[in-house]
Each structure stands twice: as C-alpha cells, then as structure tokens.
Amino acid sequence: MTVAQRDEWRRPGPTPEQRRIDLWAALVVTLLALVSLTLARSTGSFLLSPPPSGPEQLLWTVAVTLPLVWRRRWPAATLLVVATAFIAAQARSAPETQLSSWALFSAIYTVGAWGRDRRLARRLRVGVIAAMFAWLGIYYAVSIGHIPADAFADAAGPVPPVLAAMVTGVLINGLAFGFAYFFGETSWIAARREHELRAQAEELRRSQAEARERAVLGERVRIARELHDVVAHHVSVMGVQASACRRVFDRDPGKARTALAAIEQSARTAVDELRRMLGVLRAPGGDAEAPPPATGTVDRIDELVERASAAGLTATIGVYGDPVPLSASVSQTAYRVVQEAVTNTLKHAGADLLDVRIRYLAREVELDVSDDGRATGRPCTEGLGLIGMRERVAAQDGVLEAGPRPGGGWRVRARLPLPAPAATPHEAAPAGAGRSS
C-alpha cells in the first residue's frame, strides 16, 4: 500500500456485534458512575464549592457516560458531547469525577482509533486536550482563593503545597490524555496494517489463482504441441504411403508391401510416442518415477529422412562440422523442428526433393530443411505447426526462419545455441593479455 493509499484509507465502521458491545459497556459504565456518585455523596467528598441538587448531579453523571453508546459509530460527535458535559459538570461542582474522567479518556481514545477522517481526528483530540488543560488552569485560578488555611497543615516537603498540587494535577492529566491519544493512534495503525495484510493476502491468492491458470494453459499448449508433433507427422507419412500403396497395389505388389510395412512401422512409432507422452502427463510431480526418455533426438533425424524417402521423396541428409553432445532439450527440439518441416513438405508441398542439413558451428547448431515444392498452400505463421516450432526454438533461446526460397520451394532454418565449453587451464588467457586478429 502506497503512502497516498494509506492516507486515503478509511477504517470501516463498527460491526453490529461491536455496537452491541458499546451499548452494554456504556450502560455498565453509567451504572458504575451512578454508584460512584452515591458513594461520593455519602462520604461528603465534594469539591471546594457546594454541589448542585441531586437530580442535577444525576443529569451530569449520565450526560458524561451514557454517550459512550455511540463512541465507535460517531466517535467525533461522542467526544464533543462527553467533553462539553464533563467541563459543564466540573463547572457545576458535580461530585462524580472518577468514572466521568474515564469516559472522557475513552472518548479521546475512540476518536484516535475509529475516526475515519484522520486530519479531523487529530485536530479534535488536540483541541479537546488543550481545552481540558485550559479548563484546569481556570479551575486552579478560580479555586486557589477558596482553599482553607489549614488545608495543607501537615505539608512537609520543599515544594509549596499549592504548587505541588497543581503540578501533580497537570502531570496526572497529561499522562492520562497522552496515553489516550497514543493508544488510540496505535489502534488505528494496527487496524490499517491488518487491512494491508488482508489486501496482500487477497492479492497473493489472486496471483496464485492466475499462476495456476497460466500453468493449466501452458500445460494445454504443451499437450497440443506434443500431440501435433507426434500424431501429425506419422499420420501424414502413413497417408502418403497409403496413397502410394493404392497406386501400385495391382501392378507392383512388392512396392505395395514395402509401403504397407512402412505404414505399420509409422503406426507403431506413433503409438510408442503417444504412450511416452501420456506417461509423462500422468506422472505426479515429485513422487513420480523418471519418465521414459524422449524418442525424438538429433541422432534419429536420419529416420525422418528415411521415412520421407519411403513416402516417395528424393530425400538427402548432410551433417557438417564436428558433432558435439547436445542437451536432451536441445536435441529433442532439433528433432521436432525437422519432423515438423518434413511433415509440412509431405502434406502441403507436392515436392520431389527434400534436403536436410545439420551444421555444427562454433556456438550453435543449425538445422536447415528445404524442398522444391510449392510455396503457396503452406501453413501461415499462425498455423499450429509453425507456432509449435517457434515456441520450442524460443524456449532454447534460438532463432527460427521459415518461408519460400528465392529459387522456388520452401525452407525452414533453426539455429539453437550450444552451451559454452569450459575453458581448460592451458586455454585460459592470462590477465591483461591482448588478442590478435
């Protein structure tokens, strides 16, 4: 929560349960104040001036304490009523002061804890406290001349007794008002922090829900990509081979049997890869056994080329450079890219030639698949096949290019970065050494 949001935050009003608590608490305080009034009258503990009549004493006692019923519902109004009644009762020399003082402190605390307008709450509390000290000063100034001569006959301290009484009154009231102000402000800060924690918890819950949704979406995309890569290629090859089998079935049974055998092998391979993929998807996280290794790796790209040849294409493969070990993810990505490119050639190109090249460069491996088929009719960049290739290559921080060749046909080229080889001690250059070109 920003500073501006903190300043704008308003504490919600009291709940029905809190209002019921305020009602009963105020009634109890009022009852105790009436008991305190009865005891004060019974002991004759009056202030320096004669008390008012009995009904007026009851009136002031109730007027100071009973408004606490609404202390959390309307804290500012309650404080103003209680403070005004308290000063008026003191001015009329009402004998009940104990519970009335606590009612005033409770009203000051409540404005600090529940005041929705913070600026008004601070000004109102400071104003009431200042008014109380002003009234205390007026009371001392008016009453000092009415103190009996023998009121402090037993005083023995170094401080004049009247001054000591005044300082004591100021200190006691200062501490009481200070605590009421401090704890009210602390309560409001605690409520705001609780709100912030709830807001953060809710934001965390929403973030977790969004993360779960993204994970589900990512898993669906991965399943769709795997299904496309596994099924589309083998079904496309089987379709081409079945078509060739149909054309030569009567005049060349040998070629027909070869095509049927290739169809059978493609079907078996597709089923094996589907079982592998389903095993990975069904495996629970953490306690699951390691899934079977991926069947598609860079070492098996030549099988793709052989299947393309069996489907009737003149397919060639070339490996250039010194082959280096690839990580499992990079190797499978290379296989899937070539697989999708070969599938698109079989399905859409009407090509006669297919050329697959694997180049091991200094810092990357390059896969280049081209044909002499039609450029038109190919899947656009929004097709599932090309989207899957781009996602796989991007996951490896690679680059994919796909489009028609200048001389005719179609070309797919992917560059996948290789891990940087660790420098051996004799290869590491000394610090500060230059490099010649």
Image (spheres, rainbow, N blue to C red):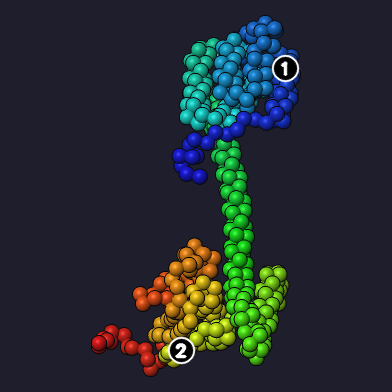
Residue 333 visible in image = no
- Among the 4 quarters of the image, the one containing residue 56: top right
- Quarter of the image where the C terminus is located: bottom left
250 relative to 399, above or below = below
82 relative to 213, above or below = above
Residue 209 coordinates in the image, percent (x, y): 62, 53
Foreground residue among 6 and 266: 266
Residue 117 visible in image = yes
Report the amino acid beneath label 2.
Gly
Q: Badge 1 local density, few (<14 within 10 Å), some, or many (20+)?
A: some
Q: Badge 2 local density, few (<14 within 10 Å), some, or many (20+)?
A: few
Q: Residue at the spot x=40%, y=85% of the render?
A: 361
Residue 131 coordinates in the image, percent (x, y): 49, 20
User: Which label is found at residue 318?
Assistant: 2
- Among the 4 quarters of the image, the one containing residue 10: top right
Foreground residue among 50 and 323: 323
Nearest to N terminus: mark 1 or mark 2? 1
50 relative to 213, above or below = above
